[in-house]
Every structure is written in structure tokens, then in C-alpha cells.
Amino acid sequence: MVFEGIATYHDQLVQGITTVRAEVLRCLERAHSQSHLNAFLELFDEEALARADAIDLEVQAGTLRKLSGVVVGIKDNICYESHHVSAASSILEGFQSLYSATVVERLLENGAIILGRLNCDEFAMGSSNENSAYGPVLNPWNTSCVPGGSSGGSAAAVAMGACHMSLGTDTGGSVRQPAAYCGVVGMKPTYGRISRHGIIAFASSFDQVGVLGHTVEDVALLTSCIAGRDGMDSTCTAPRGENLAPESQGKTYKIAYSPGWMNHPSLHPSLHQHLEAFLQRCVEQGHTLVPIEIEEMDYAIPVYYILATAEASSNLSRYSGMHYGKRDDHADSLESTLKLSRSNLFGPEVQRRIMLGTFVLSEGYYDAYYGKAQKVRRLLKERFERIMQECDVFALPTTVGPAFPLGSKSSDPLAMYLEDQFTVLANLVGLPAISVPIATDEHGMPLAIQIMGGAFEDALMFEIADRLVDSIRPNYVS
């Protein structure tokens, strides 16, 4: 049975058409049969089935929670008490978390079933999911292509039907970009809506937990369940229990867009064609298009990589082989422990970003790079505050085109970084953004559009995305 959304699934549970146990078994069978995609690092088979039986009893007794029986996968940088978490890195191999992330606690409170932990780029650093210490994830639509990153496992697991929904983390597009490549919906909330407690940090002022699913409605519901204030995260300020469900009220909206980005020379011709058709459809439906050119957007990628790597170099300094995590077997002194553990157990991309971050924070370069980048970030934030006072949302591409072949950009870090050129903006300015599939290209690969909302206007963003975009169904690989 193909998952048709949480509302339909719950109706089927209540009517006795299916059971939670049957759905968990279906997801497990799917995950095992598609294990060559390498989306899951670990499946919690027995635990998931035991929880399914308990929720079936709840349903029979007339209790239906918001996420009862919804099967969810979690990215391998989200802590789950007494379960392994490694951020797909050798340096955390074998480590078990002593506590659960707030988002995990709230999933369980609302009746969700956590099926397993999902592969990702090491420490969430990457755009292709080729940087995992446990091997790359393959795209379910075409296994010769990447699924996107860093939450590639989270997107692939949903696209192949091995879980109903998944959690990823989005630092510069790491939920939205793989969602676009895998033909699913992926959303990053306003910074401060969802708690970061229990998330292994990459860049703290950018990181946010994101949600992936088949429909905007499902993504909005799960976001509502896990969002809200948390005493363990002082940056999380949104109210608990806020209803983010999209409403269809027949309103018209003011949609800002950048002609320069919608006609960017790097865009794949098929994507450019469908973006043009999307804008035309908006006009036909009575919405107002507001063209806006933002010169500062050209600086988004360099500003993001200066600031994010600076924060990464600080956050990852704790992985020294001394406190926790793995230690290199050949270390025999304090100095060799530090050098060998970090040199041999961090992957090349993580080392590259630590080095770059340390450089931009070093004496003599701090003002020239880090200081200037923070000023540009502030300018961008103020610019978008003004735009969102006049418009409801900002529409832009999610990616430059469909998923690219495995290995095609691995040797060119700059080309890989440019894969995030349309997604880093939302993280720089802290605004919510959602990627929704709009079409497939001439080879049948998914294409997507991105819609960015105003600060803490996530509900309006969901409403507009749900109304404007006709989602395509995921491709369940046989």
C-alpha cells in the first residue's frame, strides 16, 4: 500500500483497513529490499514493531494522537537515548547517546515510530551525501545520481517509501536540496522555531531541524508537533502547539522573485521552463508578482562558507580523541592523540572546512573575512525584512537542475559549494523555506521550486506552497 498522507492513514487505522504493525512491516521490508541505496545506517526493527503493537492497542481503545503510527526516520546527527549516533563520521563510531533530542522526545509524545537512523554527509558537511564515512547514498530515481546532501538519506528514505516522513538538519540547504533531487517536500523552519537541543552541531547560527515528507500538509503537521519553546535551547522562542496547517481560503498573494535568479545562466533548461510556467500560473490565478533584484545575493555563497566554516571549526574542536568518541589506535601521547585522531578520523571535507574556518578566524584575517561577512549577512537580513513587509513570500529555484551523477563534482569543491547557491540565503537571514516538486525533466528526474516566507510566518508559507504547487508523487523503486 502506498502511503497517501497522515490523514488518510489515520482514517484507515480507525476503520480497521490496516494496522500500524502492518505499515511498519511494509516500511521495514522496503528498507531491507532497497538497502543498496544505503539510506539507513541502522534499523530499529524489534523496537519499531513493539511500539507499533502498543499504538495499535491505543487506536483500538479510541486514542489517536497527531502522529499515531507515523513511521519516521531520523538523520544520524540527531540524538536518540541509548541508540548510536555518529554524524556519519568515524570519529564517533560506536558512540551511544545518553539522552534524546527534544525533537525525538516530541515525536514519541505524539505517537510516531522511529524506524532507524539515516545516512548523511559527515557532520552534515556536503551537498551530495558522498562524504559519509559509511559510503554514499544513492538516488532512488536513478542510482547513478546523488540524492543531494547533507540529508540525502532522509530524502531517499521517504522517496523510496521506507518511511512516511523523516527529519534532517538544514544548515545551508541540507534538507531542501536533497528533497528537490529526490522528488519530495522538504522544509527548513524559521530559525528559533524548532529546538536544536540534541543535534550534533555544524554551524550553530545556521542549523535547524527540517522535515521531509510527501505533502506540504504532512510536513506542516509534523513541524507543528515538534516545534516550540524548549528550556534546553535559549534560541528556540516560538510558542508550543501553534497550528501550522495550510488553509485554502481563496486569497491572492504578493509573490516576490528575482528575475536574475529565475533566469540564471546556470539553470537547467527544463527547470527554467517549468519555473517560467510556475510564475505564469501564479499570474493566471490572480496573484501579484513583484520582481526584485538584490545585488547582495551574489555574496550569499562566500558569506555562508566563511561564517559556517568559522562556526564549524569552533564546534568541532571538541572532537579531540580525549573527551569522547574514537581515538586513533597509534596515538601514544597528548600531541599524537590530537593530531592523529583528527587527521585520520575526520574525512577530507570536514578537514577542509575546519581549516578554512580556522583561517578566517585567525589573527590578521578575522576583520578581512569573518568581520566583513557578518556585515553582509546583516545587510541581507535587513533587506529581506523590508521585502517581507511588502510581500507574502519570495519564490526562487531550489537547485540549478536535477540531481547530478555520482562523483561528477567530488574533485571540485567550489562546484559542489555552488550547488547551494539558491538555498543558503534562507539560512543566512533565518527565514523559513520549503522546496516542493513541480515537474520532472526529460529524463524523468525531479525538479523543484523553493518558497521562502517571512520570520515566523511558517504557516503562511505552508499555505501558499500548498496552494500554488501541484506535488508529484514519489517514485517507489521496484
Image (spheres, rainbow, N blue to C red):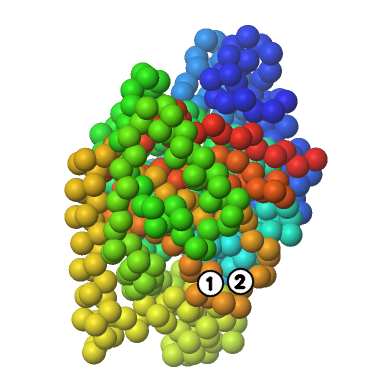
Image location of residue 245, percent across then percent down? 39, 26
**In the rendered view, would you say 340 is above or below 124?**
below
Q: CA distance from mark 2 to mark 1?
A: 6 Å
Q: Secondary structure at mark 1?
A: helix
Quarter of the picture containing the N terminus is top right
Mark 2: few/some/many CA within 10 Å (<14, 14-19, 20+): some
Q: Amino acid at mark 2?
A: Lys
Res 198 seen here: no
152 or 116: nearer the eye? 152
Does residue 299 show up?
yes
Q: Which residue is mark 1?
A: 415
Viewer-closest of 142 and 168: 142
- Residue located beneath label 2 in the image: 409
Tell me the element at label 2. Answer: loop
> Where is 188 relative to 470, above or below?
below
Disc 1 residue type (three-letter)? Ala
Residue nearest the observer in this picture, 445 or 173? 445
Pinpoint residue 163: horizontal percent, then vertical percent.
63, 38
Residue 133 at x, y percent in the picture:
62, 68
Q: Quadrant of residue 304?
A: bottom left
Q: Position of residue 410 (x, y in %)?
A: 61, 73
Q: Nearer the viewer, residue 261 or 38?
A: 261
Residue drawn at 66 percent across, 11 percent down:
16
Residue at image location 34% in from the left, 39% down from the top: 289
Q: Quadrant of the C terminus?
A: top right
Q: Is residue 14 left or right of residue 295?
A: right
At x 59%, y 55%, the residue is: 269
Tag 2–tag 1 contact (CB < 8 Å)? yes
